[in-house]
Image (spheres, coloured by chain):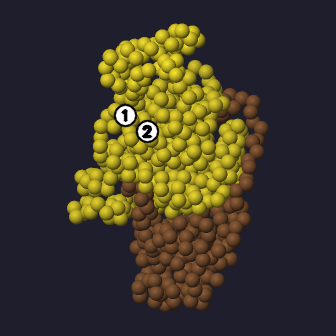
Amino acid sequence: MVGEAVSGREEVLSRLRAAVAGGSAPVPVPRAYRREGPIDLDLLVQRLTDYRARVHRVPEADVADTIAGILPTSATVVVPPQLPPAWLPATVTARTDDGLDNARIAAADGVVTAAAVAVVETGTVVLDGSPDQGRRVLSLLPDLHICVVRAAQVVAGVPQALARLAPHRPLTWISGPSATSDIELNRVEGVHGPRTLHVILLP
Amino acid sequence: MTRTFLGMPATAPQGVGQLRGEQSFPAAARQALADAQLRRNLGHATATIRAKSGAVIAEAPDWEELRAAGAAIKTDVLARLPELLEQLEARVTAAGGVVHWAADANEANRIVTDLVRATGSDRVIKVKSMATQEIGLNEALDAAGIIAVETDLAELIVQLGDDRPSHILVPAIHRNRAEIREIFLRAMPDVDPALTDEPAALAAAARRFLRQTFLTTPVAVSGANFAVAETGTLAVVESEGNGRMCLTLPETLITVMGVEKVVPTWRDLEVFLQLLPRASTGERMNPYTSMWTGVTPGDGPQAFHLVLLDNGRSAVLADEVGRQALHCIRCSACLNVCPVYERVGGHAYGSVYPGPIGAVLSPQLTGVADNASLPYASSLCGACYDACPVKINIPELLVHLRDQAPHPRAESAAMAAAAYTMDHPALYAAAQRATRLSRWAGRRGRGLPPPLSGWTAGRDLPEPPAETFREWWAKR
């Protein structure tokens, strides 16, 4: 059939127009829910820990030592192109993502990234693909993810997080390590994504 | 083509997809109730999730305000659905995606099959999606020689067990850990024979089994939880990371989405990203949420197709009372609180949409005549309405749909007779005395004789008192 795609579009739209016939005035949305809240770093730590993320609160100068304590000597990590070099200890081998293939990324012992935003109330870190966070695949295939968050990136709740994020960027919201509720509706950590998540929280 | 009125709201076609059961709800429920293991598994799982969900909802002091906002946003979406979809189409297209429109399951299946064929792949990886189950996409792909691999743990359990999903969120809720282990040992290639039934061990087995498939399959099919008209952004909410794998690794991504999933603005996500995880898995936030807008050069799939699906939704939308069923964000909270679902499980509802929401959504998508028993699959207790994060008044909808379902003539004859009797006091007193005779007729619960026996097939007849109220009053 010629022009089938167009006719599918017109068919669906004309059905829906007939169904709503007339009523197209916007409906007012009451937004009486909380849009402000305290930025409580202790609560963030508690919420992250509650979903089995491991949290380290250190000054920026100690990031490399902290990572050295997490990863065994001579471990291999993949890192995004503009991760601050001072964060990486000399004890690990870092492979910067310059278009690494998936097999190389999957073979790494871990990945180190920065973050765009962290949410206190839900214990969430959000990555937005900036050069210090990298392509989405980078934080997906290795079994261990170390995410470095600055206190200035922390917000109280979900509304404040969305207000800070740019919709056109590829966004990944991460709340704890990979998990499933599929067996008897209980949360079990560790399926396809990284099974270990470390969050290093800077002042 | 069977379409008679071009461009008029239409229900989902027969003969494709999974919206209609093979038997009526009462017949299917009777079988399910006889399965003691099923009832134990469901009782355990629904009690677990009710406790988890209740705890995190109690943490949110503004839960009711979020529900009110969520309901209003959905009402707004439905009132101006055509314009929002056109806006979404424009934004997705501008960001490098391709938008397709499917009037029904057959068209959606054909569009996806053609897109997969064009890539040359004979295999796709899938993120759990209600819409693609509804249209029977896996069967359509199979008929075209394309293997669809379900990557969600519960979907994998269902697929390997040659089973049917029984819950919106946890399709394998009817299986316990021991049964899952047995399915893996039987159907998962190269599985470790020493596999235990520890949930973590079962999850690890799924990780090993699917890893290579993720890395080597060039096409993925997903659903969508939300699509933002204002920005063209799609969102998928998940737990395991299989969603991230499917949305990130392949060269081509095909997303099939019911038209009602669109939300007007970016800001609207702040409401639903708070409502959905707390109501569905009982978490403050699910482990992973992915958002993408069209194609991002150098990151993720470089070809993105969005298929917008009607398949009966226009018919639901045309009913001003019934359309609130399209508010549904597929959290499954109504299933977990429903006394009927908890006992019979999802299979008894026939459709991929089980439980209270299925009882109001499926009959509207197919036309009530094709799912006539579902509006009765409820005691109208109202727990579903209280639990719904977008305030769908499911009891109201059930009654509304019961009005539309075909009624047996005996029922209206009995109602007319009852009305006449109640209008005539002497007759009414005589009728009350007459019920006492039934005490001699047999023990309680025996039921009424035909043609009224249908009414008592699923109900116990109350035992008539030895003395009527009037008789007692007269003696005082």
Name the residue furthest left. B193
Name the residue at 43% across, 28% down: B15
Residue B105 visible here: no
Residue B272 drawn above or below residue B1: below
Amino acid at pointer 2: Val
Q: Nearer the viewer, residue B138 or B301?
A: B138
Residue A184 visible here: yes
Name the residue furthest front. B476
Q: Colour of chain B?
A: yellow
Assign a secondary structure to mark 2. Answer: helix
> Which residue carries the number 2 mark?
B340
Crowd band around label 2 with a 10 angstrom C-alpha radius: few (<14), some (14–19), many (20+): some
Name the residue at 40% across, 73% down: A107
Name the residue at 70% across, 37% down: B79
Chain ID at mark 1? B
Name the residue at 63% across, 29% down: B319
Q: Position of residue B274 (x, y in %)?
A: 61, 57
* Chain drawn brown in the picture: A
Instruction: Look at the numbered discs 1 and 2 and tell me whether their residues touch, using CB distance below 8 Å.
Output: yes
Residue A108 drawn above or below residue B73: below
Image quadrant for the N terminus of chain A? Answer: top right
Residue B245 drawn above or below residue B225: below
> Which residue carries the number 1 mark?
B29
Q: Position of residue A118 (x, y in %)?
A: 62, 70
Cα separation between marks 1 and 2: 9 Å
Q: Position of residue A123 (x, y in %)?
A: 57, 68
Q: Which callout, 1 or 2, points at the residue further toward the start of the chain?
A: 1
Left or right, residue B417 beside residue B159: right
Q: Position of residue B361 (x, y in %)?
A: 53, 35
